[in-house]
Amino acid sequence: MRDAANNIEGNPRMKPHFISTIALTFFLAACGGESSDSDAAPLPKPKLPVPVNERGNLTAFKITSPSGGNGSGQIQINPGVSDGSFVASWKVKDSSSDYGVAMALSTDKVADKDDAVFYYDTCGASHTACPRASRTYMDCSFNNSNVMQCAGDPTSGRNMTAYLDTLPWNGYILIETCSNGINYCTVMSRAVQLQ
């Protein structure tokens, strides 16, 4: 299945996104369909071709951790240091409108259905977890049980044991924001090492 995702990477009209996957999962659950991590629904195609200069409104993404970074540019996240706490911060051009935001662990910088989403919410003017602000700071953690979660997370985090093949684990935390439904999305990544 990874090969299928790689074949569509160069085509922006066909690129799968976290938020569209999550939205489809919630829709299927509301309609009585079943969904699980191992049985993901097929990804819908974006409705419109999106010019590059109009995709999403994410302008910055940063991860900070008390564990610091290493010489390879990775941010280290260690459950033994400050209970595995880290801060994810992002900046958007327009926070007066609602927008979807998702964060996931990934083995690469490309958002696809194989990534392990650990945070999803709607942000913007009417939301208390990530209210109207041009920059949002979210307190997150990775604990000794391999659960990754963020404050105010409606999903209460996710156990990453099945996703992590070994510790330390080298990869990326991706963030995706989507405005105007799922048609205008932006993905950014930061290299991390989970210890």
Image (cartoon, rainbow, N blue to C red):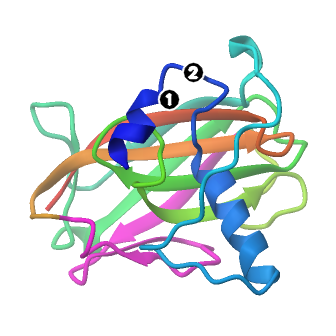
Q: Which residue is mark 2?
A: 11
Figure quadrant of residue 3: top left
Magenta region, residue range: 135-164
Q: What distance separates the C-alpha of mark 2 from that of mark 1?
A: 5 Å
- The disc labelled 1 sits on which kind of residue? Ile
Category of crowding for the residue at label 2, using alpha-carbon neighbours closer than 10 angstroms: few (below 14), some (14–19), many (at least 20):
few
Residue at (80% x, 40% y) in the render = 179
For the point 73% across and 52% down, the residue is: 100
Secondary element type, mark 1 = loop
Q: How many marks?
A: 2
The residue nearer to you, when weighing 35 against 130, is 35
Q: Which residue does the image show at 62% across and 57% down from the upper left?
A: 21
Picture quarter with the C terminus: bottom left
- In percent of width and height, residue 99 lies at 79, 48
Q: Residue 43: x and y, percent?
A: 62, 51
Q: Is residue 146 left or right of residue 151?
A: left
Q: Residue at x 48, y 73 (%)?
A: 39
Disc 1 designates what residue? 8
Image position of 98 (left or right of 1): right
Task: Report if the CB atoms under discs 2 and 1 are less than 8 Å apart.
Answer: yes
Mark 1 neighbour class, 10 Å CA radius: few under 14, some 14 to 19, many 20 or more: few
